Amino acid sequence: MSIEDYALELGIDSSEVIKKLKELGYKYNNKEDILDDEAIIMLDQEIGDLSSEENNLTEELASKFEMEDRAEEAALAYNIELDEEVKVKEKIKKKDSVKVQKDEDLVLKKKNIYKNKTKLQSNKETVESNVVLYKEGMSVADLAASLGVTATDLVKKLIEMGLMISSSQAISFEDASIIVLDYGKELVKEETTDISNFEEYVITDKEEDLESRPAVVTIMGHVDHGKTTLLDYIRNSHVASGEAGGITQAIGAYQVEKNGKKITFIDTPGHAAFTEMRARGASVTDIVIIIVAADDGVMPQTKEAIDHAKAAGVPIIVAINKIDKPGANPERVMQELAEYGLTPDIWGGETLFNQISAKNGVGIENLLDNILLIAELESYKANPNRYAVGSVIESRLDKHLGPVVTVLIQNGTLRIGDPIVVGTSFGKVRSLKNDKGIEIVSASPSTPVEITGVNEVPSAGDKFMAFETEKEAKQVSEKRKEIQKLNASHGSKAVTLDDLFARVQEGVKEVKVIIKADVNGSAEAVKNSLEKIEVENVKVRVIRSSVGAITESDIVLAKASNAIIVGFNVRPSNQIKDYAKEQGVEIRLYDIIYKAVEEMTDALKGMLEPVYEEKIIGEATVKQLFKFSKVGTIAGSYITDGIVKKDAKARLIRDGVVVYNGEIGSLQREKDAVKEVKKGLECGITLNNYSDIKIGDVIEAYEMVEVKRWVLKLKELKVQWWRKYRIYLLMK
């Protein structure tokens, strides 16, 4: 909290606060300076008189209003008409007095939060009370603080032992071990746990510290199937008691109440955003609702939503919507979903199905009951008595408030004034607003809140953690920025066929695969063949199998699920290739099924043959067609990239799908036969034994270059070593 914010809360000038701080011995000069907790507590004690004066004034005003109320009552009793203007003024005064009281209550709550900070548990590992942690280079003063004695007393005891060490000097582990015995304690060297990587940092809680928390739910499905309508109906009809009327959603998440129990809904733009958050480490959802329109049935985005939900490994509830429409056929929808592994509970399956109308509310109560049922079975718990950790739902830059971030608390409690690191940004929580836009002082697990106070706008899916001190938060933020730069320079580490055997040796029992093929028959055949592979209890699990070109959605899902993409008779565009490389996702392309099976099996056994690396040498776009009876079809083409060579291997790509794979038969420039044509030139191209060429097709020329596997491994090890070394330097 800044001096300006503190002064604003008390309704006094910043200069008065600075003056008081200097009287107390603090060196603050500017209103933008951040107050530490000790200074805030001292100010609260010293400026109490001002608050008392304000309270007296408020009481005086309240007394006056009470008398005026009685006057109004008396006037009514004697049928005396009061001036209308006077009535309006009195009503405004009453309203203002209530607001003043509410503001004062909030200020009081904020002050209490600052004073009670020590009540929360640290996210760091706790140490037994009789154990003192020794840090490298620890001074006598530091040791004294750990023992709970003064530095002077400890120096005296050291002199008695014959050790002449001042309070500012470092003390060795051996000497410190002897001295702590006199205090009945044990000295242990601190094992440095890097809390800066809090995405992977495991916080362990004792069972007795855990309390029930609300379930967090995400709704996904095909566009126009009623997701928004369902969210709106639930929000408007199930707000918490006492909050009904005029409720508007202020942030991208909200809580509702059903049978006295809360449910948190996360409103993501779509399944891609949901999975992008998972890819960034934010596994915020406990339950996914797949919404399907009863008159439309299963659509392409429905299938994708199912894939994303299954990959997340969370319970799925199906909501069949629009059952009130004339063309509704819920039975058909259930049959279609059963084919995708979502067998209805009424058919003996494990998936809960609900028939609803989001428009008029039919079946909504039953849907909420099913959410609470799963929540009870899964027993979602968290520890509210520690510093908060969670994830970013959305963020924006406000020209008045600065970075404004919506976060979901996943464990612990977040409070006003908590130092916080969000992604790579840091700051001190300046304000907290709930999903109703009401300012609060703290937020418990599974609660969505809007916060201000961080120095940069983070990304959706970023993790956050609150810390004990602002200094520690700043250090963690800076370290995370350095590591982010390092990771960006070397790319992210994802699973590949080349390192699959090593992953298996480390304990991986499942290889996740996404299949994209030219036709349904091929996709099904590749899926069945790969899922039959089993090497030393390691299986292949296909998390998506579909027809068409490889898309960004496939890359996002592969990234989040640590999967390999297998393409059969399809070709990714250059944009998709670049995106996959950027995300660290491996794409393997095949035109023979047994080859895919063979490579996957050999990878699991650690027996892969030398790699033949495909090298794209050129690309051409078909602009015109010339047909001759003797020659066949000549594709009048423009070379868009690289060089196209005669007799080179070539693919004909149409809408991202490979329709031909063979060789270039001939190349012509004007009327002359040539061996190669460079970028920016036009030429005529024929393909060996193929004439079904269309305008807009892309001809991709390539060569196969053999690369020894040990060369690839050497490169990989070199990158890994350098990366680890850089991280080691940063951690020192």
Image: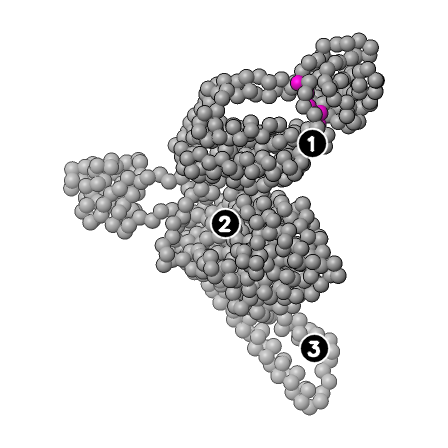
Quick check: 29 left or right of 580? left
Amino acid under label 3? Lys
Of the image marks 1 and 3, the number of the one nearer the N terminus:
3
* Residue situated in front as seen by the camera: 710 or 266: 710
Q: Which residue is mark 1?
A: 656
Q: Which residue is mark 3?
A: 87
* Residue situated in front as seen by the camera: 363 or 276: 363
- What residue appears at the point 19 percent right and 41 percent down from the top-left corner? 178
Mark 3 and mark 2: span between their CA atoms? 50 Å
Image x and y of residue 198, in percent: 45, 43
Question: In this orientation, does residue 330 appear?
Answer: yes
Image x and y of residue 321, in percent: 67, 58
Image x and y of residue 536, in percent: 41, 35
Coloured how? one colour
Q: Which residue is mark 2?
A: 390
Give the extent of the magenta segment: 649-653
Label 2 CA crowd tier, 10 Å (few <14, some 14–19, many 20+): many
